[in-house]
Image: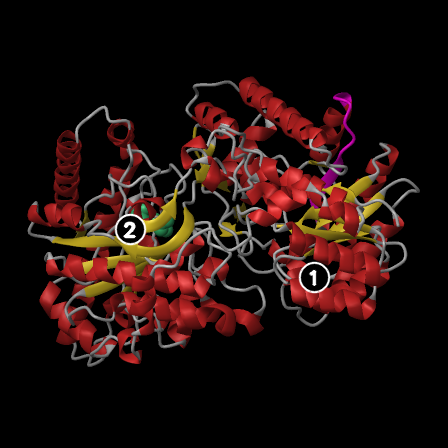
């Protein structure tokens, strides 16, 4: 049998201590030079390559580095830079890249950023390429070659990684935010561009090239497989004797494409044997593996931090080698971009806890171990310490179940998942009880986390200030924030979330069952990183978490203060979930804990409660047939369980940081919230058509400006946006808000933006009531405010 070699799909690029984030943010603040940014980037690449080489990885990725996002890099590589960014005429390519990613406002012009979307089922966001001229796509850059040669200069041969043409084509959009029209000439332009890349790497004597095609894990539309073939045939033909092509897939199964892929004769095919394992294995068994192809078995999870169970992985590799092909490589299931850097330095967790975790660096060793063990006889495996030590982690003694939690769950009744009376009735009563104007204004919850706020939290953590001093400081900030919101005239106020480092970690810290790391950061978008907590054992609430802050905020004002919670699905999706019980079970445990908090807030006089489900859509299975069975059925139920017991006049809001829920719009409505706010400022408003068509009952606040960008939207621009929205939805159901929390912004842009937002809402409100008055005078019976506005 042939040897088993090792491969990594991609490695985290932000750095062990977020060096890349820090230097880029300093650059944005003009506190570091571009040369410094480049130097840090180069040294990170060198370090990451070296680490992988030292761990014995045979195929080390290059071009997995990015200043901001690999989709954006691909768009730039293919010449898809929209005119408005090119016209800024930056001298340095990095500045153009940052302008596309974050928008730009300055002497060169004023442009918004391209939209961002979640990368499949992860919390990583990619920039959606905008392609003005699809037929003109061509090889327009050198980044993959430069980085390949950079590694070579350090004595390392790497495997360049690119987003493949199929995924690129599927994710790219026209300037009107539509899917690209796939014509012959578009296909040939794209295939030619990629073939040129293959050729060029042939000239450079690269040995392996990896094309990532996660989009293959999605349901196929008619013609998709033909498209895939048409894109890849020219690439495969462009191979020279030396260059091998690895088609890499992940985040799910490619069962419905496997036969096509297999027939094409790639040198390597990467399949995810963590997610979509059964389906992938069945397809491989059915069609076999092309004699030209090495199967890259993705057995090391790139999406969770638990140790690999070697017995399971070896079982898979053994079975493949015995029954299907002896050309097997051991690989990550997807890029390691989605896990933190290393467990080194997390000693506070204790060795007995830490031994259960493997971050990116530790996963390199796992890949090596599995490949080493794979070629050993049963005999020598039996005497292997590595294997014995690994198996001891899975002997079932890690945690004890909490019987109180189990009892509570066992006693839930169907009625615990239903809020009464029905929503239409509630909305009517709430309008009266809360006394809000039309187009009520609010924010999503957090206000800028300025340095003094972060310092105060850190000081408390380190014991440098007393609990009393900290509480005093926070109350002060809350009072100021409330006062400021009153001044600018917002309708529903928030306390500002200053006490929260993060919307998930904060709740994790106040619930039983979680563990936390010091430095386990994962890139979310651009320079933004998150540090998910770890679900370690059964979850329950010890005591009230947010009530004192919200109640204090409410005591500062006569206006309504909105309580602010994170929902159970989001807490789980933005944590590292356990692998020994199901996600459904973990979500239910969380739902009970948050339900207790909702009821405590209500008891403390909070009349509007927002339960953020920012991550609900994220884990929607890629395959439609799995949506309900494997996810929505229990995810939506968990949300309903959280709020079903509140009084009729308590208004329940939810929030989502995206608007791609057209296809699950009924499920969103079935969460049975009274109001939902969501991101809608970047990109089109097609979701509002879906809302209309579905007779969506939930009141809605489509975000009217982009908080991911530092630019301040003017009042006129906001009025225009509100008009646009009103053309698609009735004023009675519309809320006016930014598109997400303001935590990452500065005060300097936040307050003027909100002032403009309130002014815009007031202006449109006045227009609406003028229209209504004039209609009443003219005896127009149709009282629909938005209809009137449309005509006006
Ligand atoms: N309430 C949270 C905040 O405002 C919501 C954050 C989010 O949606 N990501 O920060
Ligand atoms: Zn959000």
Rendered location of residue 48, percent (x, y):
64, 29
* Residue behind label 2 places its C-beta within 8 angstroms of ligand 1: yes
Which residue is found at the position 43% from the left and 73% from the top? 633
In the image: residue 386, left or right of residue 699: right
Q: Which residue is mark 1?
A: 182
Front-lying residue, 250 or 108: 250
Q: Which residue is mark 2?
A: 444
Residue 529 position (above or below residue 253)? above
Viewer can see residue 569: yes
Residue 302 position (above or below residue 425)? above
Q: Is residue 155 magenta?
A: yes
Front-lying residue, 649 or 392: 392
Q: Which residues are magenta?
A: 153-163
- Sequence order check, earlier mark of 2 and 1: 1
* Residue behind label 1 places its C-beta within 8 angstroms of ligand 2: no
Looking at the rendering, which quadrant does residue 110 occupy?
A: top left
Residue 622's tag is none
Viewer can see residue 521: no
Q: Is residue 447 magenta?
A: no
Rendered location of residue 297, percent (x, y):
73, 53
Front-lying residue, 381 or 543: 381
> Which is closer to the viewer, label 2 or label 1?
2
Alpha-carbon neighbours of circle 1 within 10 Å: few (<14), some, or many (≥20)? Answer: few
Q: Secondary structure at mark 1?
A: loop
Residue 168 position (above or below residue 726)? above
């Amino acid at each position: 049998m042939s040897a088993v070699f090792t491969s990594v799909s991609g490695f985290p690029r932000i750095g062990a201590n977020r060096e890349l984030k820090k230097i880029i943010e300093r650059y944005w603040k003009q506190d570091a030079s571009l040369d410094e940014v480049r130097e840090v980037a180069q040294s990170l690449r060198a370090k990451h390559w070296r680490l992988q080489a030292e761990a014995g990885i045979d195929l080390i990725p290059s071009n997995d580095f990015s200043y901001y996002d690999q989709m954006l890099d691909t768009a730039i590589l293919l010449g898809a830079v929209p005119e408005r960014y090119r016209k800024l005429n930056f001298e340095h390519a990095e500045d153009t890249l940052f302008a596309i990613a974050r928008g730009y406002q300055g002497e060169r012009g004023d442009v918004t950023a391209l939209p961002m979307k979640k990368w499949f089922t992860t919390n990583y966001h990619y920039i959606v390429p905008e392609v003005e001229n699809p037929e003109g796509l061509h090889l327009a850059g050198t980044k993959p070659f430069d980085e390949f040669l950079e590694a070579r200069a350090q004595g390392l041969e790497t495997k360049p990684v690119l987003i493949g043409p199929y995924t690129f084509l599927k994710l790219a959009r026209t300037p009107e935010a539509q899917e690209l029209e796939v014509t012959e000439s578009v296909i040939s332009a794209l295939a030619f561009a990629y073939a040129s890349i293959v050729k060029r790497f042939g000239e450079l004597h690269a040995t392996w090239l990896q094309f990532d095609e996660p989009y293959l894990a999605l349901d196929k539309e008619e013609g998709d497989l033909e498209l895939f073939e048409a894109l890849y045939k020219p690439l495969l033909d462009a191979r020279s004797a030396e260059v091998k092509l690895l088609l890499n897939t992940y985040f799910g199964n490619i069962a419905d494409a496997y036969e096509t892929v297999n027939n094409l004769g790639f040198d390597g095919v990467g399949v995810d044997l963590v997610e979509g394992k059964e389906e992938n294995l069945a397809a491989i068994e059915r069609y076999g593996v092309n004699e030209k192809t090495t199967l890259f078995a993705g057995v090391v999870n790139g999406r969770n931090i638990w140790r690999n169970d070697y017995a399971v992985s070896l079982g898979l590799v053994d079975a493949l080698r015995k029954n299907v092909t002896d050309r097997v490589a051991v690989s990550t299931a997807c890029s390691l971009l989605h896990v933190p850097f290393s467990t080194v330095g997390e000693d506070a967790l204790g060795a007995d806890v830490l031994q259960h975790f493997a971050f990116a660096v530790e996963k390199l060793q796992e890949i090596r171990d599995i490949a080493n063990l794979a070629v050993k006889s049963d005999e020598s495996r039996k005497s292997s310490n590595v294997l014995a030590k690994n198996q001891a982690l899975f002997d079932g003694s890690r945690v004890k179940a909490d019987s109180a939690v189990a009892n509570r769950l066992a006693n839930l009744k169907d009625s615990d998942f239903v809020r009464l009376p029905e929503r239409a009735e509630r909305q009517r009563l709430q309008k009266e009880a809360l006394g809000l104007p039309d187009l009520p204004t609010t924010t999503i919850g957090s206000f800028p986390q300025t340095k003094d706020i972060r310092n105060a939290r850190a000081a408390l953590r380190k014991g440098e200030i007393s609990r009393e001093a900290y509480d005093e400081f926070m109350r002060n900030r809350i009072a100021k924030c409330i006062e400021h919101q009153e001044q600018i005239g917002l309708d529903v106020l928030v306390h500002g979330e200053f006490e929260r480092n993060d919307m998930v970690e904060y709740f994790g810290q106040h619930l039983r069952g979680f563990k936390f790391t010091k430095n386990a950061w994962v890139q979310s978008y651009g320079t933004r990183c998150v540090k998910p907590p770890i679900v370690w054992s059964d979850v329950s609430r010890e005591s009230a978490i947010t009530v004192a802050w919200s109640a204090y905020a409410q005591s500062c004002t006569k206006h309504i203060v909105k309580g602010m919670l994170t929902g159970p699905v989001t807490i789980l999706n933005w944590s590292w979930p356990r692998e020994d019980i199901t996600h459904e079970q973990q979500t239910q445990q969380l739902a009970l804990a948050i339900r207790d908090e909702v009821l405590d807030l209500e008891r403390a006089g909070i009349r509007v409660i927002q339960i953020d489900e920012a991550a609900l859509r994220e884990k929607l299975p890629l395959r439609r047939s799995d949506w309900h069975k494997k996810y929505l059925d229990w995810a939506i139920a968990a949300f309903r369980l959280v709020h079903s017991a509140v009084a009729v006049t308590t208004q329940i809001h939810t929030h989502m940081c995206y608007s791609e829920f057209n296809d699950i719009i009924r499920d969103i409505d079935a969460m049975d919230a009274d109001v939902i706010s969501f991101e809608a400022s970047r990109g089109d408003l097609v979701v509002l058509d879906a809302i209309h068509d579905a007779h969506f009952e939930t009141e809605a606040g489509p975000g009217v400006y982009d908080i991911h960008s530092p630019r301040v939207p003017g009042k006129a621009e906001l009025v225009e946006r509100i008009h646009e929205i009103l053309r698609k939805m009735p004023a009675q159901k519309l809320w006016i808000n930014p598109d997400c929390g303001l935590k990452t912004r500065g005060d300097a842009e936040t307050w003027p933006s909100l002032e403009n937002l309130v002014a815009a809402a007031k202006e449109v409100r006045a227009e609406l009531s003028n229209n209504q008055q004039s209609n009443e005078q003219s005896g127009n019976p149709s009282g629909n405010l938005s209809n009137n506005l449309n005509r006006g």
